Amino acid sequence: MKLRSSSALLVALAIVLAFLAGSVSTAVAGPALTKKLVKKIAAKEVKKAAPKLSVAHADTAANASNLNGLPADAYLGRVAFAGGASSVAVTAGVKAEVATVNITVPATARLVRITGSLSFDAAAPNDAALWASVDTLCPELSGVGYDQRVQLAMAPTRSRGTTDYVTLLSPGVHQIRLCGAPQANGTAIGPQLVVQTIPRNGSGGTS
């Protein structure tokens, strides 16, 4: 039954294509093939072969130019990245901005992954904090980025700290800053900041 239905559908489509291409001879026995007659034959065969298929409205179907009813950019990710200077002098107790990126968040991909990392060194061991702020200056010490801050050691032998989190942002342009708060004078080494939107139904997302 499946084979017969497929064959009928192919026949109907072949008739339509032949008519449109002008390859159907007017010498064929029987009534002349008019556009109306071809349309009627095709509709009849398609209905038998695939009852739920609607050829007549294919050009105006809701998903004709979309993917599951969504525009293509709903499935595209965007990425912005920055690396600050290879080394940045930092001062004890001063909140330092060591890398900055701007990213435009589309309405269809509002989940955003933010990853920042760097190393601190200092003449003597001490502590430091690291975070990636969203639309706030580093000295403000607030917001989702500051809530995700990490602690790391400042020492002559460097240890690298990384902040990595996912948050939901409103559509539009956002500024992300990689911030550090050292407890001693020293140097921030190799700061890196990567911001990536997560497309709809991407890893971890149903935005």
Image (cartoon, grey):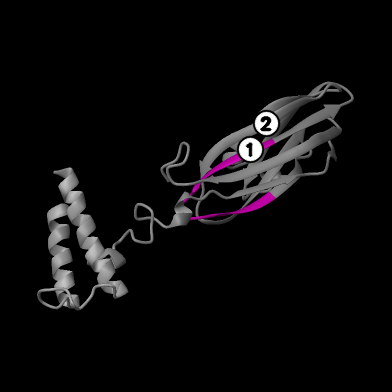
**Residues under labels 2 and 1: Cα distance?**
7 Å
Q: In which quarter of the image is residue 124?
A: top right
Crowdedness near tag 1: few (<14), some (14–19) or many (≥20) residues, C-alpha within 10 Å:
some
Q: Residue at x 24, y 67 (%)?
A: 16
Q: Does the magenta stretch include residue 62?
A: no
Crowdedness near tag 2: few (<14), some (14–19) or many (≥20) residues, C-alpha within 10 Å:
some
Q: Kindly identify which residue carries mark 1.
A: 115
Residue 181: x and y in percent read 74, 35
> In the rendered image, is residue 54 in sight?
no
Question: Which residue is at the front of the view, 171 or 9?
Answer: 9
Q: Kindly indicate whether the residue at mark 1 contacts the one at mark 2 (C-beta within 8 angstroms).
A: yes
Element type at mark 2: strand
Residue 103: x and y in percent read 61, 53
Element type at mark 1: strand
Question: Which residue is at the front of the view, 72 or 174?
Answer: 72
Q: Is residue 118 left or right of residue 2?
A: right
Counting labels gives 2
Residue 89: x and y in percent read 86, 39
Res. 162 mark: 2
Q: Does the magenta stretch include residue 108?
A: yes
Q: Residue at x 89, y 25 (%)?
A: 123
- Amino acid bearing label 2: Thr
Report the magenta residues as a range: 101-116
Q: In this view, does 189 lie above or below 74?
A: above
Question: Which residue is at the front of the view, 69 or 165?
Answer: 69
Q: Is residue 1 left or right of residue 133?
A: left
Q: Which residue is at the far left?
A: 30
